[in-house]
């Protein structure tokens, strides 16, 4: 995945987690991992935290399909699942 797409997806994920008030700890951890990735280009933390975010956002989408866009889920799957 291109860096620009990765950045867009992670930023959108962070915004959605914050907007829906889902797991503030995960939001903080994903933010930290993203900043770390920008510094050292090691995606391990971003991928791990994105997988957790994907699970949360999928569950929220099942509750309310309008809460989380299908595109965000698909983009996040590309990041989290490769």
Image (cartoon, rainbow, N blue to C red):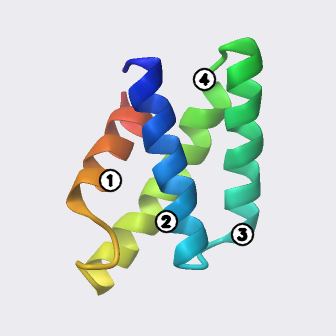
Q: Secondary structure at mark 4?
A: loop
Q: Mark 2 and mark 4 in contact (Cβ < 8 Å)?
A: no
Which residue position holds label 2?
16
Upstream in sequence: badge 1 or badge 3: 3
The reply to whether the C-beta atoms of the residues labelled 1 and 3 are less than 8 Å apart is no
For disc 2, the neighbor class at 10 Å (few under 14, some 14 to 19, many from 20) is some
Q: Residue at x 54, y 61 (%)?
A: 15
For marks 2 and 1 on the same chain, the one whose residue lies earlier in the sequence: 2
Q: CA distance from mark 4 to mark 2?
A: 21 Å
Marked residue nearer the N-terminal end (4 or 1)? 4
Q: Residue at x 53, y 47 (%)?
A: 11
Above or below residue 79? Residue 77 is: below
Whichever of callouts 4 and 3 sits on the residue coming sooner in the sequence is 3
The label on residue 24 is 3
Q: CA distance from mark 3 to mark 2?
A: 11 Å
At mark 3, the secondary structure is helix
Q: Which mark is residue 72?
A: 1
Residue 79 screen position, x and y as percent:
42, 34
What residue is disc 4 on? 43
């Amino acid at each position: 995945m291109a860096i620009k797409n990765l950045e867009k997806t992670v930023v959108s994920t962070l915004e959605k987690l914050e907007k829906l008030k889902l797991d503030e700890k995960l939001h903080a951890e994903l933010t930290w991992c993203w900043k770390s990735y920008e510094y050292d280009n090691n995606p391990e933390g971003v991928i791990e935290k994105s997988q957790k975010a994907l699970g949360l956002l999928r569950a929220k989408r099942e509750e309310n399909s309008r809460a989380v866009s299908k595109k965000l889920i698909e983009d996040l799957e590309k990041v989290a699942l490769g």
